[in-house]
Amino acid sequence: MLFSLSYRNKQLTLFTVLLLCLVQFSAHALFVSEPRDPLPLINEIFPQATKVSDKAGDPLVWTIYQQEEIIGYAFETNDLARIPAYSGEPVNMLVAIDPKGVYVGAKVLEHHEPIILAGIPEKKLWAFSDQYSGLNVSDRLKVGGNKKGNTIHLDGLSGATVTVMVMNVAITKSATIVARSLGIIEAAEEIKQPMATVLPEVYKKADWQTLVGDGSVRKLYLNRKTVDEAFVGTEAETIEQATPEQKSDMFAEVYYAQADIPTVGRNLLGDSEYQWLMKTLKPNEHAIIVLGNGYSFKGSGYVRGGIFDRIQILQNDGAFAFRDLDQIRVTDLFIEGVPRFKEMSLFIVREHQEFNPGVDWQFELLVRRQIGAVDSVFTSFKGSYHGLEQYLNRPPLILPEPELTLTQQVWQDKRTEVVVLSILMTLLLASLFFQDILVRHPTFMHNFRHSFLVITVVFIGWSWGGQLSIVNVFTFLQALVSDFSWDLFLLDPVIFMLWGAAAVTMLLWGRAVYCGWLCPFGALQELINVFARYIKIPQFELPWAVHERLWAIKYLILLGLFALSLDSLALAEQFAEIEPFKTTFLLKFDREWPFILYALILLTINVFNRKFFCRYLCPLGAALSTSNSVRLFSWLRRRPECGQPCKTCAKECEIQAINPDGEINMRECHYCLDCQVTYLNDDKCPPLKKQKYKKNKYKEQEIAAVNVG
């Protein structure tokens, strides 16, 4: 049923008025984020602060004081980690940490994100940044995803995933740089050695010289000159100083080794004493033997306070000393060639000290000089120890997990979407290459197409937010004329893959494939209209002369948006709300009522007129159609009779992309292949029906041959 032209004109007039109202609302109700002054925010984060220093240093940091005490540090992410977000510009954040590396606050100072500028309230962005309070700089933080290992997962922001992921990387990277520069955390994660164990059955008879020579027993030797030089510049420089003749004299000679290693302990202590020692040791305890001459490694501290204050063991980032209960006196050594020692002791390393025989450790000797009745100055000397491979079961090293770039992290998190989308694209390409076979089976063809469109709407559109927009085009053009980087576009794998598919299909077949198969809003419109036709809702089509002229609207909209983008990309993004994509798929109709009303009006018009928005208003479709002049293939078949006299395909084309002369306008075609179904159907295509009729009539008139031989 066709409506009257006057009624159609009234509808178009009403629609135009609503569209102008929406654009007016979009231009004035939305705003560009203005930069915020960081100092009031610092005072808000640290209400107890009495002084805030100037931003200074490398990296640039504000230091916050309460009286004379430092209570925190603040910095801007743009000073340390400028990472482009969805708009191509970074989101500048103010981040504050305390002296222990705990996040005290994170505030948005400035952003240019279109998804926030038009659609998602800024308070949601602020709520996201509030999640950092109380977390530590050393924590592994990740936006969204399933809980894995020791990673702390932050709640994402629906519709602005790329934005908040970029914010997270900027915050954590900047905080790490500052914390490392201030010594709050180590410069880099170290390679970890799992706990090694001593091999109890490995034993070889050896003399003293052999154990010292292969490193089983290590030596720390100090002469008087070395010790005097260590005190130069201190208050004790001249105390107990050696004369020139004494400089080469021995000050201390200390040998040390891990005595619970059989080859070391049994050779030094003898079999019976070693067995007694091993029975004395509890699980995960070890024994270190220390033998010394000269300066006493025992001192007198263990007598007064129960602690040996002249020696300690260093391993990794830890250090521990021994108490009197950890010491066992050694009265004799049974190994051949051993010198005499003034002091000999075994020290028990307790389980809680987490000593790892497989990790190198150091023996540290502290030398103290008194400068008064109570005060003293000390210095230390260290000797290293490496457990020999033949004595230990040393598991393989655990290498630190390589830190993924933001792009790698995003693609890893989206691997399911990437795989499924790759399969869909492969299936679509196969369908296009074998379209001549597919269209010979109309029922299967239509079921296949409608199923594909459902997947496009539900998964690509609503689940993955994979709706291309004219905003993407403007962002790409801006990147070309500035500092182009693929990282900006790789941050959203689904959008990147869809643009890749659009680029490939545009080159091969023109705009038609993306608009007809992969555009979620186009697919939603088509499915709604298919259902409307199924339940017999009347359809109206504009006269060809009106329809043909309305095509120009989307090109005018495209030119207007492009002109705006040259002056202000943010303003162009606001006027790009003429596309209802963000409302429908990214925000799922959760926004201000004018945007919802606009999208619903377009979908309602589509009930009566298929793909009204795509045909007349879509600036993205207009941009993609410019590729028609360079497409390589034209696989939609036509006959000389198409258009004159046959107009069957033109009447059946539900978006009126076939001209009255029978030519398919590839700038407007959506590659639904309905015309190709008709082209090969001898029950619908008049030229084929005519041929079929003549063939059947010839068979009826044919006289059967009779064999008279």
Image (spheres, helix red, strand yellow):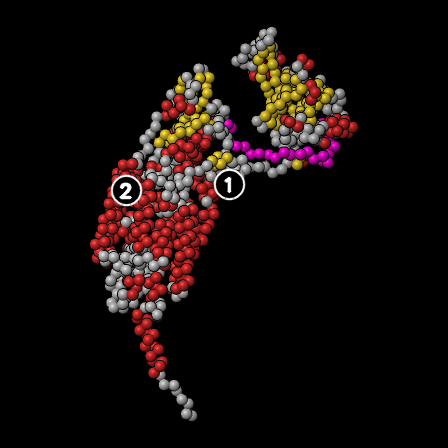
Tell me the element at label 2: helix
Determine which of the numbered discs, if any, sits on residue 195 in the image. none
> In the image, what residue occupies the spot 26% across and 49% down?
554
- Residue 117 vs residue 543, the one in the foreground: 543
Q: Can you say whether 683 is above or below 187 in the image?
A: below
Q: Of label 1 and label 2, which has the lower sequence position? A: 2
Q: Please, which residue is most extreme toward the right here? A: 272
Residue 188 included in the magenta stretch of the image: yes
Separation of marks 1 and 2 at Cα, in angstroms: 40 Å
Label 2 sits on residue: 22
Q: Residue 189's x, y, as percent?
A: 52, 32
Identify which amino acid the numbered label 2 is placed on: Leu
Q: Please, which residue is most extreme toward the bottom here? A: 709
Label 1 sits on residue: 146
Report the span colored magenta.
185-212
**Residue 246 can be seen in this image:** yes
**Residue 470 can be seen in this image:** no
> In the image, what residue occupies the spot 35% across and 50% down?
521
Q: Residue 205's x, y, as percent?
A: 74, 32
